[in-house]
Image (cartoon, rainbow, N blue to C red):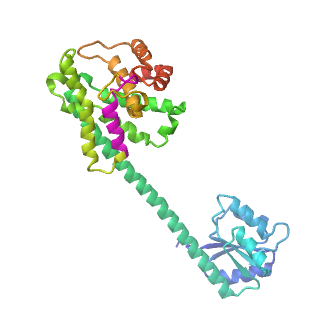
Amino acid sequence: MEDNKKKIIVVDDDRTNLTAAKNALIGKYDVFTVLSGEKLFSFLEKITPDLILLDVEMPEMNGYEAIKILKSSKSTSDIPVIFLSAMIKPENELEGLDLGAVDYVFKPFSQDLLLKHIELHLLLEEQRRGLANYANNLEEMVREKTQTVLELQNTILKTVAELVERRDDITGGHIERTQSYLKMLVELLEDNNVYKKEFSSWDMELFVMSSQLHDVGKIAIKDEILLKPGRLTPEEFEIMKQHTTAGGDIIRKIEKSTSQSDFLNHAEALAESHHEKWDGTGYPYGLKEDQIPLQGRLMAIVDVYDALTNERLYKKAFSHTKSVEIIKDGAGKHFDPLIAEIFLRNEQEFERADN
């Protein structure tokens, strides 16, 4: 039958005291006795006790020196220590408690009183461990729940994104590619401390996830315009521009019925502003420079890069080199110059990701 008794080590340089303590505890606990602080640490290499009774007045290494070592080691710092002492001065007792002891028992001790002190502190330690386990389990449950919610959100987003792409089949894979490019671009900007202050308040996982909705407004565009095999007329292009405001409207409607405001704020900014231009010549509002939400400025460059490097019904795919030249020419005009600089400095990483 398994022995479930708690293990207690008694440390005292006086054999009489050790015998008295062992006789008091032996029926209820597994008791181990050692004659010095040095021997205690040798013993701790073989066994981890539930509690230590530690004499204060010992030669070579006294109890205060021993407890300092115990509390400095991760493997022994949580073991409750009760001091055994013949000294009853308050300042001595306070010193021991400050060093991490949970209690004092004064010698010569009463057997019943010693047992009560030990029972109390073993119970407190058991409760402490129970609370710690509960806290750890609760934290893990929250983490799992949060991950489940994120996975659900991502599944819904992917479904909506696929619906958009099925209508706009000339850009198949566009949403997945731009999401990947956006993640790369944000990581590069963070590595170079560009827009560090702005990024500090963002949940990057949510931001990148929300980019799947940047073209959601295309749901509202008629097939004859969305799927036209060729360049749009000026009138048709004006209608196509409306996918940005339509996307913003769709997301704002969702916002009214959910508390996920951070996530949807990103999605709204991405949908509505990814066609704005740094010099103010973009659409739908003609915003300029910092008036354009950072989300839109980030999306603009990866959106254009993907459009350039992939075939459309009205154009062949451009090479990576040609696409980079176009983006370089657009820095400070179409694109935020700081973001364009980081993209251009690391353009080979985007080429590798495209292959």
Q: Quadrant of residue 101?
A: bottom right
Q: Is residue 175 visible?
A: yes
In this view, the residue in front, 310 or 242, is 242
| Location of residue 258 with respect to 126 vertically, above or below | above
Residue 232 % position (x, y): 20, 17
Q: Position of residue 274 (x, y in %)?
A: 34, 29
Q: At 74% across and 81% down in the image, what residue appears?
A: 19
Instruction: State the image coordinates of residue 182 (x, y, percent, origin top left).
Output: 40, 30
**Quadrant in which the C terminus appears:** top left
**Residue furthest right in the image:** 59
353 on left or right of 222: right
Residue drawn at the location 20% of the way across and 25% of the way down: 239
Q: Nearer the viewer, residue 28 or 146?
A: 146
Q: Could you tell me which residue is drawn at 65 percent across and 87 percent down?
A: 112
Quadrant in the rendering for residue 39: bottom right
Q: Give the magenta-colored segment's residue range.
A: 262-280
Classify 213 as above or below 120.
above
Of residues 206 and 37, the one nearer the viewer is 206
Picture quadrant where residue 302 is located: top left
Residue 159 in view here: no
In this rendering, position of residue 32 left or right of residue 200: right
Viewer-closest of 304 and 296? 296
Above-or-below relation of 338 to 156: above
User: Residue at image x 62%, y 70%?
Assistant: 50
198 magenta-colored: no
> Horizontally, is 94 left or right of 79 in the view?
right
